[in-house]
Amino acid sequence: MSWKNVKGIKPNDPKPRKWTPLKKIAEGSATRFHNGIRIEYENEHYTAYAEFSEDRTAGLIMIVNDDQSARRDWREFQRIKNEIAGPGWVGYEVYPPEHEVVDPSNAFFIWCFKESKLPNSVGMNGPHYLSPEESFAPQRGLI
């Protein structure tokens, strides 16, 4: 089934948003990792707060849209993960049991690890990016 043929589903804007690399704006001590580091970054779309373990093998990135919306874009979040942790790191979003949910704001969290303990980073064989014309669901152009 093609999403292009589903009633009511329209492709997203094929134009990517203008992007400038994240800039480091502050640094301090981590609150989640003993002896870790906390770094704050921003660009024209996001503010990101990253905390890394002392040995820099694990981290947590919190992403907030500058317009305070709940908008999320996988390709932009992948780029943020790559710019902050590195393209070789794996990142995971966690959807916990309901009794453990903490949802105080429109913030998104990516847990990052220098080495994945899962085979092939959860079974993905890539890189493989599709254009709006090739995709099977609504998609926009690459950044």
Image (spheres, grey):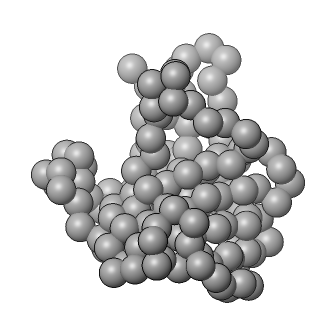
Classify the position of the C terminus by image quarter.
Answer: bottom right
x and y, in percent, of residue 141 in the image = 58, 57
Task: Identify which residue, 99 or 115, lies in the foreground.
Answer: 99
* Residue furthest left as drawn: 119
Check the image and report above or below for 56 versus 135: below
At x 76%, y 56%, the residue is 65
Q: Residue at x 40, y 50 (%)?
A: 92
Image-based side of 76 in relation to 125, left or right = right
Toward the front, the furthest residue is 34
Can residue 69 be seen here? Answer: yes
Looking at the picture, tell me which residue is in the foreground, 37 or 76.
37
Residue 109 percent location from the top left of the image: 55, 51
State left or right for residue 112 relative to residue 27: left
**Looking at the image, which is closer to me, 136 or 62?**
62
Measured from the top left, where is residue 100 in percent x and y?
Answer: 51, 30
Residue displayed at 83% across by 50% down? 68
| Up-down relation of residue 78 to residue 96 (above or below) | below
Residue reaching furthest to the top: 7
Q: How many marks?
A: 0
Frontmost residue, 26 versus 118: 26
Could you tell me which residue is drawn at 23 percent across and 60 percent down? 116
Which quarter of the rendered picture does the N terminus lie within?
A: top left
Q: Is residue 125 visible?
A: no
Q: Position of residue 90 (x, y in %)?
A: 34, 62
